[in-house]
Image (cartoon, grey):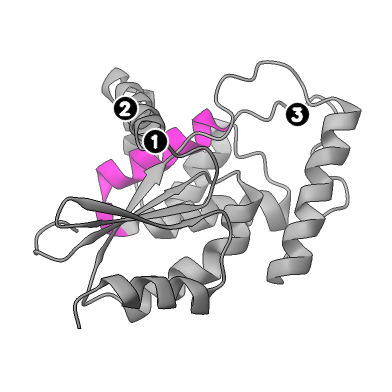
Amino acid sequence: MESNNNPTLWYFADPMCSWCWGFSPVISKIKENYADKINIALVMGGLQTEELNALSDSSREEVLHHWHQVKEMTGQSFLFDGVLAKGFIYNTEPACRAVISAGLMDSSKIFTYFTAIQRAFYTKNQDVTQIDCLQKLAVDCGMDADEFKRIFEEEKTKQSIEKSFQFTKKAGVQGFPTLILNLQNDLHIITRGYMDYDAVSTALDKLLPI
């Protein structure tokens, strides 16, 4: 990904962030249309990584309210019936670490796997906080199950995800999705929060060399 001299677009995201799910078609189109102009680096930001308690009824309603907002604005698919069941702990660290693990196994599949987690969580009501689910999704993306689990559980992978979270904080990112363009070591904020493709493309075109 970093083998050429193209500018790097940092995409700060979390697979369990609903606005990132809404942003999925936008970043996919950016990847497709700007492949020869920029490198895109997926950075796991860590939406909610220390939660140990089950989602309360009021918190569940708040989350679902956001999901409905995302669906209305972006048109992305969501499953609402029976989701976020009683006892569900909304901790995004395992899913973020799984994305890091997939990237360590095969960097070319990191976006594919990231999207697979999003789709499983938002449209299939799968519990992507659990290793069994994350492992199956890795297999579905063409990765070896045992190797994935080994890397997921390695201490250096846990350290890598913590470094990713720290990098996010150092960059001043407080919400997702966030896009920051690193252009010859000058940092340009493209968006903090959801933005449609035309707006992202316009912002990039103003900064990128012709």
Residue denoted by label 2: 163
Question: Three-letter amino acid code at disc 2?
Answer: Lys
Residue depicted at 56% across the width and 54% down the height: 193
Q: Is residue 170 magenta?
A: no
| Mark in the foreground, 1 or 3 | 1
Give the mark, 1 or 3, whose residue is nearer the N terminus: 3
**Can you say whether 58 is above or below 136 in the image?**
above
User: Looking at the picture, which amino acid does disc 3 mark?
Assistant: Phe
Q: Is residue 101 visible?
A: yes
Q: Which mark is residue 168?
A: 1
Q: Residues within 10 Å of mark 3 (few under 14, many from 20)?
A: some
Magenta-span inclusion, residue 93: yes
Label 3, on which residue?
88
C-alpha gap between disc 3 and disc 2: 26 Å
In this picture, residue 205 sits left or right of residue 78: left
Left or right of 147? Residue 80 is right
Amino acid type, residue under disc 1 in the picture = Thr
Whole-angstrom CA distance, mark 1 to mark 3, is 26 Å
- Residue 44: quadrant of the picture: top left
Residue stretch in magenta: 92-108
Residue 54 in the image: state x and y as whole percent: 77, 21
Q: Quadrant of the N terminus?
A: bottom left
* Foreground of the two, 111 or 149: 111
Q: Can residue 142 be seen by looking at this rendering?
A: no
